[in-house]
Image (cartoon, coloured by chain):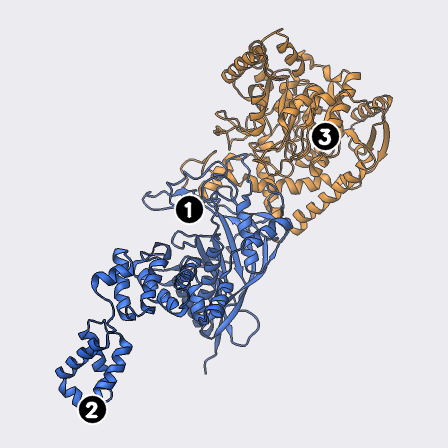
Chain colours: A orange, B blue
Amino acid sequence: MTAAEIGRGLRAGKFTSIEVTRHFLERIDHAGKQLNAFITVTPERAMADAKRADARIARGEGGPLTGVPLAHKDIFCTEGVLTSCGSRMLSNFVSPYDATVVERLAVAGMVMLGKTNMDEFAMGSSNETSWYGPVRNPWDGSKVPGGSSGGSAAAVAARLAPVATGTDTGGSIRQPGALTGLTGFKPTYGRVSRYGMVAFASSLDQAGVLAQSAEDAALVLGLMAGHDARDSTSVAVPVPDYAAGLGRSMKGLRIGVIREFFGEGLEEGTGRAVRTALEGFSAMGATIVELSLPNLPLSVPTYYVVAPAECSSNLSRFDGVRFGHRCKDPRDLLDMYKRSRGEGFGAEVKRRIMTGTYVLSAGYYDAYYLKAQKVRSLINEDFRRAFSEVDVLMGPTTPTPAFAIGAKVDDPITMYLNDIYTIGANLAGLPAVSVPCGLVDGLPVGLQIIGPHFAEERLLAAAHAWQLMTDWHRRLPPLFA
Amino acid sequence: MSIEWETVIGLEIHAQLATRSKIFSGSSTAYGATPNVQANLVDLGYPGVLPVLNREAVRMAVCFGLAIGARIARRSIFARKNYFYPDLPKGYQISQYEQPIVEGGSVEIWLPDGARRIGITRAHLEEDAGKSLHEGLGKQSGIDLNRAGTPLLEIVSEPDMRSAREAIAYMKKIHTLVRYLEICDGNMQEGSFRCDANVSVRHKGRHEYGTRCEIKNLNSFRFVERAINYEVARQIEMLEGGGSVVQETRLFDSDRNETRPMRSKEEANDYRYFPDPDLLPLSLDEEFIEQIRSALPELPDQKAVRFAHDHGLSGYDAGVLTASRDLADYYEAVVALLGGEAKLAANWVMGDLSGFLNRDNREIGQSPVGAKQLAGLLARIVDNTISGKIAKEVFEAMWEDRSDADAIIEAKGLRQITDTSAIERVITEVMTANPAQLADYRSGKDKLFGFFVGQVMKASGGKANPAQVNELLRKMLAG
């Protein structure tokens, strides 16, 4: 059942939030360990939330998702609950406050089941960098679920939770969404508050949803979005009723197909599934235009300068002084810094901190950081030009379906190339969604739809239209059917 | 013959802005609270928190920029200055680097040999760090983050000063200005106003600068003077001994009156500045700036010119009186109440009043003798009720028991004697009591006139009108 369906059932009195919540907690109990999707499960809190939600529903109060359970990526601060960010560094960090996203969804009456596994500090594309171990893909336990929101993706794909939050810095919602057969939605930068989201790369990070359907994504996004005075980069643009806009026709929609996304490296089955989807949109009355974004192939190198630079600074606060991991018996200050950080961070995080420190250093700043910023504005310009011709851009979300756990861990460059189609939207701050569009050897692949700033409604409507004519999003991993 | 050296000084002044809350969080900025009670999650740099710029700090920076005739950047950028230190919670300080809010202004300083204009390169907004505490904690150190996030305006001068004295004059000028503008309380003991001094020496007449040293964290005018003088002497001695100055950061030890190396250029941090992605570029519109401009108070220089022009005060007196806005207001109130007599008022404010304030270590606002009381006293000098000398006695009594001049004059019977026959009686007594001096005077020892004045004033208990005493004595001594 989708979150929307559960919500309708709750309001129709078919079942209670307590029953629904118990159902999901039991599923987590049975399958959670096997998938390693959760870092923390919060049954007491969930049951308390459910009880309150039932009371609200009984009074005829609440909204479409009141009483519906969800899981939060462990990057969101949750008051009184471990917020580890997948890192040993924060393996003892119980947050004293709620992130804005957590707060808003709680106010709406959603029930928190727990916190999902993720790549350490959201740095990874396979969920293998987590201090809490890799997450397994529900479609094939030997495969990765994608990352960094791998725990949220696995949890929803295996129906351990009807819906989950995620964050997307370079594809961390869309890529795992594609690899697990979900609707992964990343809003416009600034659409959702970043307050209380542990920062990886501040100019790229954006919270979003991993959902079973576009409708679910629309409902959850509607609750998360909106201006927050505590985040200076959040934007004061009114939040439309996303669910109400879902029924829009695809007739006359101008779809741009990015030529650069269909080149070398795109696995054949994935490419075929995406082209079939494009024909589907064409059949619905959309027009398809092929166009080029010449600077887009530079997005991976650009990203791997900008994101590490920001992360090297953002992660400086983890110094063992006020919170987080502190080494045993430090000899002096320097020893405390070195060992606390040396022990607290994993290899990928260290690699990015070092890269970021390097590109910001005197003498290298101009050659790397500044140049990357210039390329970033060229990529922005490419998108801007494209959106003067078309309403949305479409292409694959990932080059291949899910790969085997362990296959790329020793080869960061190959791993980084997994995000080749998703990073552009982050660099330009654009909203984008991945929707399931087929199975390749029993593994899901995703169609990515990118829109101009604040075109969330348009993307959700396209995703919804696609889901009305297909059932890929209804397919369940055989083991969890 | 020894070479003549020229000193070159530039100052970086840190003025703590007098906002109620911090620059990027809602915590209070009040001084002296229990450690860490004024540090919220943002100040503590907790995971996930974000900075939100305090508009009041921006207003104050613009205020300063307008007051020094600088350019106000319509768009400025906050950057991160990255370094590790326990009292720097985030591991970076949010500051402005490449595009500061204020650029290119100047102030005029007044020196015995005339006025000089000192250039101000820039002034930028930044957050203060916390404090490390080392006392009473054994082998451990404590961190107090109450100060972390307090707004600072860093005011960077051009290397335009040529002596410690000029540096002090400049620093005092900025100190005056920020208090006029009410953007900084100027409290140096609490660290609200402090500076780093960049000092170098060169052969006089040379164009290029010598290698400089930066002396950190000077928090009194006296320390700035002593630190610069020590540093100049040290550099000259080093150069004359055939050595060279090493560019480094030094600390001033006020107990030993010397500067000591802190870190050299080689050990200097690479701060890896880059624009803070958590804060949008700061955009200011014309309306905001114009609003601030129209609300600017009369500035010290404008006030000094007005005092000199309208009140007929010397440039020096006008400068002293306008050094603090409160002092100038006090002086102006006295003049207004007196309906003139600016010079008399100026002398009293700069003389007795300032002397007593200094003696008791009080600010003008805490003076037991208010402007109205002082005007009351001076009015009695003007109308010849008392002499200037008696007035000093009355002033002291007013200071002690906070009563009005008239009450004291009455109670102590200090009213001036202006009755000619009464004064003549005293003079006759004095002449009779000092026959030898009288004879000497009459035989040509004119100098003794002063002796007789003194005797008459003494005999009258200081109450005789001095002008009348002079006139009558001259007549009667002549015989």
Give the left or right position of residue B133, taking residue A309 as reference: left
- Provide the chain ID for the residue under circle 1: B
Measured Cα–Cα span from mark 3 to mark 1:
45 Å
Measured Cα–Cα span from mark 3 to mark 2:
112 Å
Q: Residue at x 40, y 55 (%)?
A: B188
Q: Nearer the viewer, residue A297 or B445?
A: B445
Q: Residues within 10 Å of mark 1 (few under 14, many from 20)?
A: some
Disc 2 secondary structure class: helix
- Provide the chain ID for the residue under circle 2: B
Q: Tell me where residue B135 appears, x and y as whole percent.
A: 33, 46
Which amino acid is tagged 2?
Arg
Q: Tell me where residue A101 appears, x and y as whole percent.
A: 59, 27
- Whether labels 1 and 2 belong to a single chain: the reply is yes
Give the left or right position of residue A138, taking residue B310 as reference: right
The residue to which callout 3 is attached is A432
Q: Nearer the viewer, residue A167 or B28?
A: B28
Q: Quadrant of the N terminus of chain A?
A: top right
Q: Please say if A128 is above or below B434.
A: above
Q: Please say if A388 is above or below A163.
A: below
The residue to which callout 2 is attached is B442
Disc 1 secondary structure class: strand
Q: Quadrant of residue A63?
A: top right
The residue to which callout 1 is attached is B131
Q: Residue at x 85, y 33 (%)?
A: A290
Which amino acid is tagged 1?
Lys
